[in-house]
């Protein structure tokens, strides 16, 4: 079984400005899946989130 690489991701809602720092798994295509679906302000439009991978 292959281990998937973990990544730390910063997500900011462009509607209300709320920020979330989450960990996710890197998909084979290079994308990071965190399971984040909806902000506290009920925003669930993926285009209205700023998503940035954090490098430490």
Image (cartoon, grey):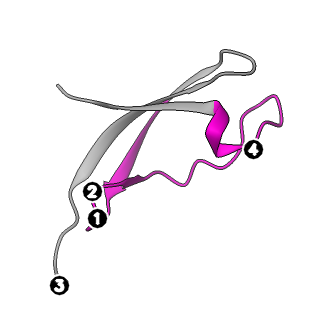
Q: Is residue 25 magenta?
A: yes
Lateral position of residue 24 relative to residue 35, left or right: left
**CA distance separating discs 4 and 1:** 23 Å
What residue is pinned by disc 3? 1
Q: Can you tell which quarter of the image residue 23 is in?
A: top left
Q: Please, what secondary structure does the residue beneath circle 1 have?
A: loop
Say whether disc 3 or disc 2 marks the residue closer to the N-terminus.
Answer: 3
Q: Earlier in the sequence, mark 4 or mark 2?
A: 2
Does residue 23 lie above or below 2 as drawn?
A: above
Determine the secondary structure under disc 3.
loop
Identify whether 40 is placed above or below 34. Answer: above
Q: Which residues are magenta?
A: 21-48
The N terminus lies in which quarter of the figure? bottom left
Residue 37 is left or right of residue 34, and the answer is right
Q: Name the mark nearer the viewer: 1 or 3.
A: 1
Location of the C terminus (image quadrant) = top left
Tell me where residue 31 sits by quadrant: bottom left
Identify which residue, 6 or 43, lies in the foreground.
43
The crowd level at tag 2 (other Cα within 10 Å; few <14, some 14-19, many 20+) is few
The residue sitting at 75% across, 44% down in the picture is 44
- Which of the two labelled residues, at mark 1 and mark 3, occupies the earlier sequence position? 3
Mark 3 to mark 2 CA distance (whole Å): 19 Å
Residue at the far front in the pictured view: 47
Q: Give the numbered dot on residue 29.
A: 1
């Amino acid at each position: 079984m292959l281990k998937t690489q973990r990544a730390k991701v910063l997500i900011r809602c462009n509607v209300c400005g709320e920020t979330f720092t989450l960990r996710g798994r890197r998909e084979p295509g290079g994308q990071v899946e965190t399971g984040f679906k909806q902000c506290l302000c009920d925003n669930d439009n993926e285009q209205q989130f700023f998503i940035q991978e954090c490098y430490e």
